[in-house]
Amino acid sequence: MIIVLKPEATKEQADELLARIEERGLKSLYMPGSERTVLGALGDERVLGELRLESHPMVESVKAILAPYKLVSREVHPHDSVVSIGGATVGGEAFMVIAGPCAIESKEQFTQTAEQVKKHGAHALRGGAFKPRTSPYSFQGLGIEGLKIMGEVKTALGIPAVTEVVEASDIQAIADHADALQVGARNMQNFRLLKQLGECGKPVILKRGMAATIKDLLLAAEYIVSEGNENVILCERGIRTFETATRNTLDLSAVPFIKQRSHLPVIVDPSHGTGRRELVEPMSRAAVACGADGIMVEVHCNPPEALSDGAQSLFPDQFAAFMQGLRPFVEAVGKKL
């Protein structure tokens, strides 16, 4: 429920209404504006109706929040959110590029790749320390050792880093070394993990599940935000369809659709979305054109020898050309690379 107060309403009167909302076990929101103060009340709809806030003399109007995802919807938060990852921003006028290998394989491999992606303009590093793989025989990542490598390399280069969290028990260890925690497609609806990430406070990159609807994705984000962490970035990484020409079907229509309904920034992962390095550049340009706030791409210092996802990883010289070719597209939509 959204409660719009009259222009003459005071802070004390707003606090009185907030107290009434909280007394009934509901979550309250206080959103002061330049012309009006807006309050929010989230919870059981039957209890919301019993409050009868529309009869209060300082209440101008009351309306229901129609979207099932309340806090991430534009009904509650009409303006675009901007999230900071170690000083680099996602959203607004900034266009973020996150780049690096799928997995951290060694300090030498990660350092070489990190140096190249920073040199050619990436704003943040990516690299997996814990790797959830479809096959139990595939490389599962270096774990804590990989986290330590990431921490050392990002500190030495002065660039923020992003890595995936698989288990709720690993959140604190990852937060100690990374600037943002990524929830992979397989964990998008791991609700216990999402709730604990909401309590963590660190920025979260939430990837869309392989068979998830947009509504599913936004409700997953609601789990994180409802626990107090507003620093959520959504990531379209492709969904599984009957098409076999590409690894996944990269659903770029999801980007403008989500941005019409949610204030959260949206980035695109064309590497996982296609599984083919020759498609990463055109799909990245298309992502810019349809309104994405950033992209996440895989780059490896030696893709043929990569232990994970070599076929979709760019060579360093390809990434350099990729960044040069991306710039005019970013500038054409009014953003800064």
Image (spheres, grey):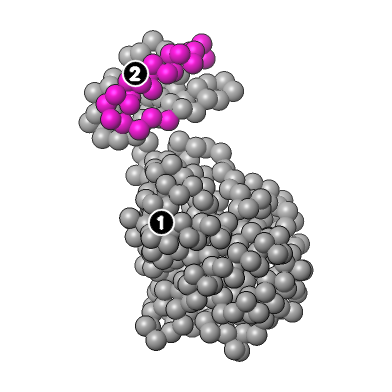
Say what secondary structure mark 2 lies in.
helix
Q: Nearer the viewer, residue 91 or 121?
A: 121
Q: Relative to residue 134, is residue 33 drawn left or right?
A: right
Determine the residue located farthest toward the bottom in the rendered image: 304
The quadrant in which residue 327 appears is bottom right
Q: Where are the magenta residues, as a range?
A: 6-29
Position in image of residue 15 (x %, y %) = 42, 18
Instruction: Answer few, some or many: residues within 10 Å of disc 1's Cα (few below 14, many 20 plus, some between 14 and 19).
Output: many
Q: CA distance from mark 2 to mark 1?
A: 33 Å
Residue drawn at (42%, 47%) of the image: 199
Residue drawn at (72%, 57%) of the image: 337
Residue highlighted by disc 1: 217
Say what secondary structure mark 1 lies in.
helix
Residue 148 in view, yes or no: yes
Above or below for 337 versus 138: above
Residue drawn at (44%, 23%) of the image: 4
Position in image of residue 258 (x %, y %) = 48, 52
